[in-house]
């Protein structure tokens, strides 16, 4: 019996099942459950932001850096736009529309300079050309928006295209590199009806999707795979035991006339039954 389960087929099946379960428990399930947890946390922050009045940015990010736990907080800023250091975010569709997002620095009076996402404009000529869009208003203004955590540098470096500085992610570091402006490490997503806003960036849908159920499914798959292998091992053992018992019964019913006939008949029955069973399989 041990030799049966030491064959290459059973050994490979056991290895594959072990690898699948390990991968399901250590990567796939945590990946989906982690996404669900992050979405739940984000939704709670957004809901809290809209249930709370905006506060001066100095109360949340006096040095320009926002704690991830305070992301999406609504803040007010008083200062001036700096259109000379404006950059565009490219290759970032909005509502499935090819678009450019306009990122304009805003110098806070007596504070740091924040990159402000003023919104988006649809790309022209099939999604490759920057359209004309209204410039940021001049003079001292007070604006309101949501503080966001910087997305981090993109593998593709900033470029100058069509007369505009462009980045591939909302990275204040890369925006500073291409414009020379000293920017805070966080940025502001401008709210609707604010000075300088274009088409405002839509807020995320407050839904966690199916990530929780997917994570639980991967856990279930990780349990079911070895359970299935155990079942097939048990079924194989049961089938072989039944085959052996049938052979013993046949031998017990046989009444050979002499010792030689008994041996010959048992041998023939054994091989005939084994052959028939293999044919059925």
Image: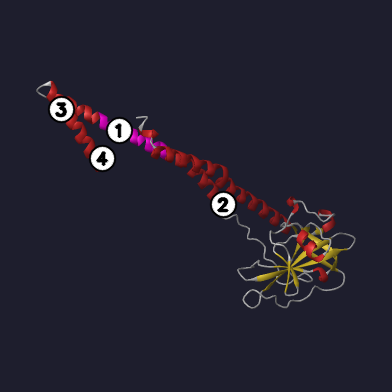
Which is in the foreground here, disc 1 or disc 3? 3
Which is in the foreground here, disc 2 or disc 3? 3
Residue at (46%, 39%) from the top-left corner?
15
Q: Are marks 3 and 4 in contact (CB under 8 Å)?
A: no
Q: Which residue is mark 1?
A: 240
Callout 4 secondary element? helix
**Mark 2 neighbour class, 10 Å CA radius: few under 14, some 14 to 19, many 20 or more:** some
Which is in the foreground here, disc 2 or disc 4? 4
Looking at the rendered image, the quarter that the N terminus falls into is: top left
Instruction: Give the side of residue 205 with respect to residue 51, left or right.
Output: left
Looking at the rendered image, the quarter that the C terminus falls into is: top left
Instruction: Give the side of residue 194 with respect to residue 219, left or right.
Output: right
Label 1 or label 2, whichever comes before in sequence order: 2
Q: Which residue is mark 4?
A: 278
Residue 45 falls in which quadrant of the image?
Answer: bottom right
The stretch in magenta equals 228-244
Label 1 or label 3, whichever comes before in sequence order: 1
How far apart in space, not on screen, are marks 2 and 3 (Cα)?
A: 66 Å
**Which SS does the magenta portion mostly show?**
helix
């Amino acid at each position: 019996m041990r030799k049966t389960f030491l064959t290459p087929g059973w050994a490979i099946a056991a290895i594959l099942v072990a690898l699948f379960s390990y991968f399901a428990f250590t990567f796939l399930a945590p990946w989906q459950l982690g996404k669900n947890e992050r979405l739940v946390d984000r939704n709670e922050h957004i809901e809290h932001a809209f249930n709370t009045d905006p506060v001066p940015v100095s109360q949340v990010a006096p040095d320009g850096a926002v704690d991830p736990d305070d992301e999406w907080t609504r803040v007010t800023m008083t200062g001036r736009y700096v259109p000379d250091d404006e950059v565009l975010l490219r290759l970032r569709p909005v509502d499935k529309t090819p678009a450019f997002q306009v990122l304009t620095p805003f110098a806070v009076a007596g504070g740091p300079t924040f990159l402000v996402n003023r919104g988006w404009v649809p790309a022209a000529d099939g999604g490759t050309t920057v359209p004309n869009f209204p410039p940021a208003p001049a003079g001292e203004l007070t604006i309101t928006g949501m503080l966001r955590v910087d997305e981090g540098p993109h593998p593709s470096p900033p470029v100058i295209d069509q007369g505009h500085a462009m980045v591939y992610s909302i990275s204040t570091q890369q925006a500073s590199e291409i414009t020379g402006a000293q920017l805070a490490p966080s940025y502001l997503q401008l709210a609707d009806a604010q000075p300088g806003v274009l088409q405002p960036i839509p807020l995320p849908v407050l839904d966690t999707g199916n990530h929780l159920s997917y994570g639980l499914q991967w856990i279930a798959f990780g349990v079911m795979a070895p359970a299935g292998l155990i079942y097939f091992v048990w079924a194989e053992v049961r089938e072989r035991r039944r085959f052996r018992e049938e052979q013993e019964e046949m031998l017990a019913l046989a009444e050979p006339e002499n010792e030689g006939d008994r041996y010959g008949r048992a041998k023939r029955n054994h091989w005939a039954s084994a052959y028939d069973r293999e044919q059925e399989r």
